Image (cartoon, helix red, strand yellow):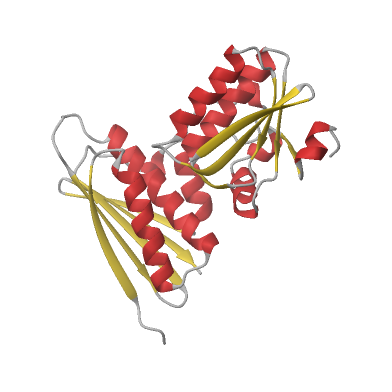
Amino acid sequence: MNMKSEKFQNFTVLRIEGKIDTARSSVLEDEINRLFDNGEKNLIFNCKKMNYISSSGLRVFLVAQKKSTSLNGKLYLCNLQPGIQEIFRISGFSNLFKIFETQEAALENKQ
Amino acid sequence: MEKQKNKYFIIENKIDQLSSLAEKIEDLADEWKLSQDLTMKINLVIEEALSNIILYAFNDKDKHEIRISISIDKNNLEITIKDDGILFNPLAQKKPNINLPAEERPIGGLGIFLMSQIMDKMHYSRDKNQNILKLNKSI
């Protein structure tokens, strides 16, 4: 798994790449917490190169969503691969997040 | 009819074994020419089952072996997982309510639900000191 974060307007985009499994999900959680601790409250997770997520990864997304809500922030997802979209759908997670097809659409909040 | 293919894996009850098992399963999927989608689902189901076993099935600090078998024929995928942990029937766990909003969604409890959504059939049995979980999916 790899991660990169970049500032775009008033959002911080976190690119999540590779596999978010039980062994690696805490690395993602630490990175997201670091962003929140730095005062970033508007986040976009760009999942273009994320090719695997298990329930432990979904848990990290859910914790981030709860944290974002408590901070009155925004948390958007974009560029989910079809297999990942299916996992989000069957777990009911599609309804918990604003999901955009592209990063540009997320930045403009255009669904 | 296409011949059935089988593969066995044995891992220890340590979370850090899961990533290397996933890589071995990817190699196997290449060899068996399985689709990327099916490979991801096999890995997901196995990870969910094994992480539950590794995290919750053992009360001691001893080394335990967990046995995984994967068999596949033209129309069916079967995954069997055996461990010698405490009696645990994943099928008897309460289903999460997936319609709750984020604020009310409990953290966790999703793994077994994902397994049940991906596979067509899940069967649990206890044989002496073993938990046996058998999972089937039409392909």
Q: Is residue B131 visible?
A: no
Q: Position of residue A63 (x, y in %)?
A: 56, 24
Q: Position of residue A33 (x, y in %)?
A: 54, 19
Which sits in the foreground, B88 or B6?
B6
Residue A41 appears in which quarter of the rendering?
Answer: top right
User: How many numbered markers are drawn?
Assistant: 0
Q: Position of residue A18 (x, y in %)?
A: 52, 45
Residue A96 appears in which quarter of the rendering?
Answer: top right
Which sits in the foreground, B40 or A106?
A106
Q: Is residue B82 left or right of residue B114?
A: left
Q: Is residue B2 visible?
A: yes
Quadrant the C terminus of chain A occupies:
top right
Which sits in the foreground, B126 or B10?
B10
Q: Residue furthest bottom?
A: B1
Q: Position of residue A43 (x, y in %)?
A: 69, 26
Question: What residue do we see at 45% from left, 58% from top?
Answer: B121
Q: Is residue A18 left or right of residue B80?
A: right
Question: What residue do we see at 45% from left, 50% from top?
Answer: B44
Question: What residue do we see at 62% from left, 20% from top?
Answer: A66
Q: Is residue A88 above or below residue B134?
A: above
Q: Is residue A109 left or right of residue B27?
A: right
Q: Is residue A76 above or below residue B31?
A: above
Question: What residue do we see at 58% from left, 31% from top?
Answer: A61
